[in-house]
Image (tube, rainbow, N blue to C red):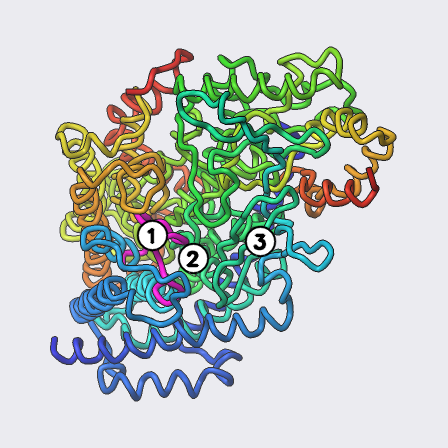
Amino acid sequence: MTFQGWVQIAIFFIVLTALTPVLGAYMARVYTGRPILLERAFGPVERLVYRLIGPSSRVEQDWKAYGRTTIVFSAVFFVILYVILRTQGIQPFNPEGFDSAPWDVTFNTTSSFVTNTNWQYYGGETTMSYFSQMAGLAVQNFVSAAVGMAVLAAVIRGFVSRGSAELGNFWRDVTRTLLYILLPLAFIGALILVSQGVVQTLSGSASFQTLTGVDQTLALGPAASQISIKQLGTNGGGFFNVNSAFPFENPTQFSNFVELLFILLIPAALTATFGRMAGNRRQGWALYAAMALMLVVSIGVAYAAEQNGSPAQENAGIEASAGSTDVDVQDSGAQTGGNLEGKEQRNGIVASAEWSSVTTAASNGSVNSALDSYTGIGGLAPMFNMMTGEVIFGGVGSGLYGMLLFVLLAVFIAGLMVGRTPEYLGKKIEAREVKLVMIGTIVVPLLVLVATAIAISSKYGDPSIYNPGPQGFSETLYAYTSQGNNNGSAFAGYTGFVQPNAPGNTGSYGISFADLLGGLSMLFARFVPLIAALAVAGSLSVKRISPVGPGTFRTDTPTFVLLLIFVVLLVAALTFFPAVLLGPVVQGLTDSLVFPK
Amino acid sequence: MRRDLTASIVAAVVFTVLCGLAYPLFTTGVAQVLFSDKADGSRVERDGEIVGSSLIAQNFMTREEIPEAERGKFGKKQVKTPDPSYFQPRPSVTGYSANVTFFNNLGPNNKELSQMFRGFLDAYLELEEPFTPGLGEGDVPVDAVTTSASGVDPHISVANARIQANRVAEVRGLDPDRVNELIDDNTDNRDLGVLGESGVNVLELNLALDEEGQ
């Protein structure tokens, strides 16, 4: 680990912390309907959208109405996306003439994008037309993110409401999120990325002869516009199969930094939006602090583990320490050292390890290195981030409403310890809320463990596994942890060689099983906590706010931050400890090599 | 419920037009005007012909036909060996494909991965040791013997380039100091001085070498 590496990580957190209150305040204006500058440009579009949607866009909704609209809207989009992907062959913008994927892969992909997961069982540049990417997948990148943020806005309104059951209007929240937050930011981001070398064109791939006379073909496409929103909206689905490792998605050290920042930008800023709407900015900073602390530790663990190198490397006689080369090299330290297998030279160890932690803390799931090649402990860091239920920043909107459920749990536990009625933001937390919180926080880990157990113990899960030994178990656990938390990153060996169109494809046995189990996991993981959070907000909204007194348990202090971290870690550790031991920990403890099957 | 359904269908169409067509097409237009070279894939030309993309690695191998009588039982028609007059990029399991990409995905404890590394290490030493006497296993930079994530990593480490410089200079009859200067010219340093790692762009370096003359 180098000084330069830590400086790089420090700069990232400084910039992120500086942007959080700025964007947070702006988003609070968007959600409280106060005037903003962009309304002059997009106001007419906004009003046109409301006119087209009709009277539904003008009524105030309670939590049940809000939740119902969310579900119906997502269901409609599910059907539309499924149809688009299945009729790809007859659509425009398809220069490579790709046909559609089979129904089961399409079911998985559709579930994946509607739920903001972006798990990829398909290869971008080998199976998807430009039309499917733009009008199908990229639209979901926007819309699924906007839905998460809209629901969060409604949940916050419930938490701070002074007795009214109304949580806002779904259509207004989604439309304003798209027009005033996501579209402008995505546009700016896309241009920054193109300036670094990310491709953005409608023409088909380009073929030529290389310097030594070999044929090479460049896959192209409207990538920048989609990558920009995939990072901002914590979606993560790559335009190309190897995602942000591909130079046309992420060409420079600077583009890597910008994309990293974009992953956390909105989830981080939403904590400040929450603080503003709650009328106490310290409440927002407390949540930000808890999230940031957990993330820093995770980055440190991954960085240290990867810099040490892997057993496979050591066994082959490769020296893992940086700067070890002293034969005719003027500047020592001119190489990265560490486990560089599956990582890009321009990112090196530190920017790869940082990315893997950031992308799993936020439920983004894009990768700039191959996670399956990480060491046991290096791979445990991203896996554990997801196991916390995606609340370390988490998905846009969904991360914070998930964290608010943990806050109520922490407040409840603190209340039990000191023997007072637990309160949050002046509202009493009672039996109904605690029950809903338990549903919201337990369903997801349950899904993950059950799905993993089914996959690992049945013959249908077996062909999906690629690596031998504990790594094979880790692949399975990672796959269902990722899909069951709407993350979307993968130990990509899993099903890598059984999916259609995959290189080295070995046939179709086992595909439907992995597609269906994963697809269902994603749908439940998205909508159960979403409804639970709305229900909690609905139940809190009608409660009186009691004034702050000397006996009030403060939730904006360092003590509370530590308590919150403790509760999040405790729930994750208690749930996943045995499973984690069997996979990544065993992998990390041994130096011996395993033969492939 | 029915009202939600009709509103959802209308909204789906509106949002698809807005985010799925207007946004990417408008972005494409602006990007093509502002940064057309980069938006089209940073293509590199020589004598008016496209020879590659500066962001995508390509292989620098020589191919020798095997005479029919000497072909083994698999009937392999060509032997590919690294062209000693060029700098070599990082190994790739995808054959430097820029239109079908995939990870290697072999795990950290996989015997197969270790054997693959061993093969890369032996090949590297065989190629470089004659020109860099005393080069041992422990001196080989990791980037030279591991595969990248994308399979088309355009960069190698400076340490790796310095070792290869001895070979390239001797084969081309160039002054080693001049070759090292070219390495410096084609190194993409850390952006802002701290981000990521420095890397030497192999294609651009090789093009610069060819311009020096043999």
Q: CA distance from mark 1 to mark 2?
A: 9 Å
Judging from the image, mark 2 belongs to the subunit labelled A
Label 2 sits on residue: A230
- Of the image marks 3 and 1, the number of the one nearer the N terminus: 1
Residue depicted at 50% across the width and 55% down the height: A262
Q: Is residue A543 visible?
A: no
Three-letter code for the amino acid on which mark 2 is drawn: Lys
Marked residue nearer the N-terminal end (1 or 2)? 1
* A115 inside magenta stretch: yes
Which residue occupies the foreground of this view, A331 or A586?
A331
Which quadrant would the C terminus of chain B be assigned to in this image? top right
What number is the disc on residue A208?
A: 3
Q: Are marks 1 and 2 in contact (CB under 8 Å)?
A: yes
Quadrant in which residue A318 is drawn: top right
- The residue tagged with tag 3: helix, strand or loop? strand
Residue position for label 1: A118
Q: CA distance from mark 3 to mark 2?
A: 30 Å
Label 3 vs label 2, nearer the camera: 3
